[in-house]
Each structure stands twice: as structure tokens, then as C-alpha cells.
Image: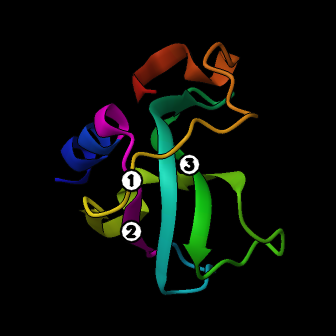
Amino acid sequence: MSLKLLQQAIQQRKPISFEYNKEGKIAGERIGNTHAVFIMRKKDDTESTKVHLVQTAGVTDSGKGYNEFRMFDILEISNVKILDESPAFEIHHAYNPSWAGYANVIAKV
């Protein structure tokens, strides 16, 4: 299951690769450093589980390049792999473990 792999990657601070299958997004492998997994509650009280990571490589449709935080819906990701051969990643300078969005955190660095 993706959630267990994401939690393990966070604990070990290892990068991951994954496919993002959300409609309207460019298909293909993405690589990044997962900093948190959390439940986001919208204003209409619906919830979704999100992955907050710094994308470092792979396809992107944000137009922002790499090394910035991105949020992905966990239900739309597949083929999650921990890149064990890579060194542990440094915590990103913009990471805020006290961010209000992490109110329902599952795991974070």
C-alpha cells in the first residue's frame, strides 16, 4: 500500500518515485522528497489524504521547475518506490512542521 511506503520513506528521509494518475495532469514518473502525509479537510467538510513533497525530478505540469513543495492526492498516485540507493534527503528550508494544514497529520519529518 502506498501509505505504508510513504510513511517509511518519511521515517528514513529517502526520496520516492511514483506515478500520478490525476485527470488533467501529465502522466509519467515523478521523483521527490516526501515531508508529510496528512488529511486535508475542505470548507465543505470533505476530506482527502495528501502527500506534501519537494519534487526533484520527473514530469511536471506546474511550470515551476523543481525543488519546490507540491501536493498530491494519495488516491491518485501509484507505483510508489522508495529509492533506497539514494542518500537521505535534507529537510527543505521552506518546510514548516507547524503549518496549520498538518492539523490531521499521519506522518511528517
Q: Where is residue 68 shown, x and y percent of the image?
A: 73, 54
C-alpha gap between disc 3 and disc 1? 16 Å
Q: Is residue 20 on the magenta stretch? A: yes
Snapshot quadrant of residue 15: bottom left
Whether 94 is drawn above or below 21: the answer is: above
Numbered tag placed on residue 53 in the rendering: 3
**Residue behind mark 2:** 17
Query: Which of the two discs, 2 and 1, labels the residue nearer the N terminus?
Result: 2
Mark 1 — residue? 87
Bounds of the magenta segment: 10-21
Q: Position of residue 35 (x, y in %)?
A: 51, 37
**Nearer-N-terminus badge (3/2):** 2
Left or right: 25 as drawn, with respect to 8 = right
Q: Nearer the viewer, residue 39 or 93?
A: 93
Q: Residue at x 44, y 27 (%)?
A: 108
> SS of the residue at dot 2?
strand
- Mark 3 → mark 2, Cα distance in angstroms: 11 Å
Q: Secondary structure at mark 3?
A: strand
